[in-house]
Amino acid sequence: MLDPTHVCALMGTVNFFLLSTARRHLYAQPALQEKVVNALLTPLLAGDILHLVFTLWALGDARWRFAEWGGVLWTTILLGLTLLVPRVAWHMGIGRYVDKRDGKVF
């Protein structure tokens, strides 16, 4: 059980440093910053979706019996959704600079 914890901690550390570095050093180049952040968030989004799909698939018929879910399963699903929602919002362009949309000169 400790190995997944280490992987999550490592991924969180990489995310923190990559996002803060992109913000700190690429603030004057929003199009490049967008590409770097996209390169980080796209595989994480795919991983979130696949993780939730495979978790629910592995439950079989028990996936719809919420009362039988244990604390670890609830934590897995809720944490997965908590990570999924901001990544989907970023890809939809909510609350961020989008070069194709915002970079146009009128």
Image (cartoon, rainbow, N blue to C red):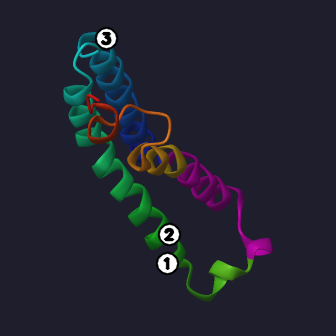
Task: Using a 10 Å C-alpha cutoff, classify the residue at mark 2 as few (fewer than 14 neighbours), some (14 to 19) or many (20 or more).
Answer: some
Q: Which mark is residue 58?
A: 1
Task: Using a 10 Å C-alpha cutoff, classify the residue at mark 3 as few (fewer than 14 neighbours), some (14 to 19) or many (20 or more).
Answer: few
Q: Amino acid at mark 1?
A: Ala
Q: Residue at x 28, y 16 (%)?
A: 21
Task: Using a 10 Å C-alpha cutoff, classify the residue at mark 1 as few (fewer than 14 neighbours), some (14 to 19) or many (20 or more).
Answer: few
Residue 31 at x, y percent in the picture: 22, 29
Q: Dot 1 lies on which element?
A: helix
Residue 5 at x, y percent in the picture: 45, 41
Location of residue 32 with respect to 94 vertically, above or below = above
Q: Amino acid at mark 3?
A: Arg
Labelled pair 2, 1 in contact (Cβ < 8 Å): yes
Q: Which residues are magenta?
A: 66-83
Q: Dot 2 lies on which element?
A: helix
Query: Magenta span: helix, strand or loop, mainly?
Result: helix
- Residue 78's image quarter? bottom right
Q: Which residue is mark 3?
A: 24
The answer to whether residue 85 is magenta is no
User: Where, quadrant-wise, is the C terminus in this rendering?
Assistant: top left
Give the mark nearest the N terminus, 3 or 2.
3
The answer to whether residue 74 is magenta is yes
Nearer-the-camera pick, 58 or 33? 33
In the picture, measured across the screen, residue 84 lies left or right of residue 41, that is right
Q: Which mark is residue 55?
A: 2
Q: Residue at x 60, y 59 (%)?
A: 77
